[in-house]
Image: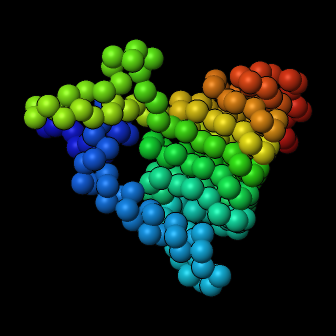
């Protein structure tokens, strides 16, 4: 049985972003995101947030406007705070654990393209070119503080009890109980484990 384009996307395989199912998911997210980013009615905003995400825990706070591509690919734990102007390019699954703090202007990019320029575009049977994209999930554990203007790329797993310094670019997994920073992010120091 062949996979749908959406299933290919989530499996990290080459997929066609123009597929109707994918476009419907993104269109629904845009509609709900407009409510989230523009309404002052908190009841409507909270309903749109719950409808947009795959899962939302208790006491979720979204401060200001954000950019989200799919919405339904994101799972958010309890007591999560996301500051304004963050960008979630959730073309694969993004999981935020409990008690995660996300600083303003942070970016989460699941999508990627080939390093080989000759493999970034494919050709359809009718001769039309299409962009080839691949995706990987992002996982963020519990008790994580992500500073402002941080970038996290697809395939990264951030452990529990972690601090990501402002401006860092996280390209590799981050172990539990650590502080990382820089471009690319590197271990700065270890933290005592939470008891």
Residue 19 location (% of width, % of height): 25, 48
Q: Residue at x 56, y 82 (%)?
A: 44
Residue 132 visible in the snapshot: yes
Residue 27 location (% of width, % of height): 37, 62
Q: Residue at x 44, y 62 (%)?
A: 29
Residue 78 location (% of width, % of height): 68, 60
Task: Quarter of the image for the N terminus: give it.
Answer: top left
Q: Is residue 138 above or below residue 47?
A: above
Which picture quadrant has residue 79?
bottom right
Q: Residue at x 45, y 17 (%)?
A: 115
Residue 179 location (% of width, % of height): 83, 31
Q: Is residue 57 left or right of residue 136?
A: right
**Nearest the eye: 191 or 187:** 187
Total count of labels: 0
Task: Quarter of the image for the C terminus: give it.
Answer: top right
Q: Is residue 135 left or right of residue 97?
A: left
Q: Is residue 160 left or right of residue 122?
A: right
**Nearest the eye: 81 or 169:** 169
Residue 143 visible in the snapshot: no
Report the colour scheme: rainbow
Q: Residue at x 53, y 74 (%)?
A: 35
Q: Is residue 185 above or below residue 79?
A: above
Which picture quadrant has residue 134?
top left
Q: Is residue 123 above or below residue 77?
A: above
């Amino acid at each position: 049985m062949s996979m749908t384009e959406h299933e290919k996307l989530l499996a990290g395989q080459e997929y066609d972003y123009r597929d109707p199912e994918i476009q419907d998911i993104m269109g629904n997210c845009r509609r709900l995101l407009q409510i989230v980013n523009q309404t002052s009615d908190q009841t409507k905003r909270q309903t749109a947030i719950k409808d947009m995400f795959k899962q939302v825990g208790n006491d979720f706070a979204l401060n200001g406007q954000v950019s989200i591509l799919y919405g339904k690919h994101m799972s958010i734990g309890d007591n999560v705070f996301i500051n304004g102007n963050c960008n979630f390019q959730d073309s694969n699954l993004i999981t935020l654990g409990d008690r995660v703090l996300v600083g303003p202007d942070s970016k989460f990019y699941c999508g990627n393209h080939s390093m080989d320029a000759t493999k970034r575009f494919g050709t359809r049977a009718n001769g039309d070119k299409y962009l080839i994209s691949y995706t990987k999930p992002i996982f963020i554990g519990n008790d994580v503080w992500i500073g402002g203007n941080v970038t996290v790329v697809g395939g990264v797993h951030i452990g529990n009890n972690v601090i990501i310094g402002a401006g860092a670019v996280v390209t590799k997994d981050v172990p539990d109980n650590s502080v990382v920073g820089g471009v690319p992010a590197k271990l700065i120091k270890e933290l005592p484990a939470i008891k």
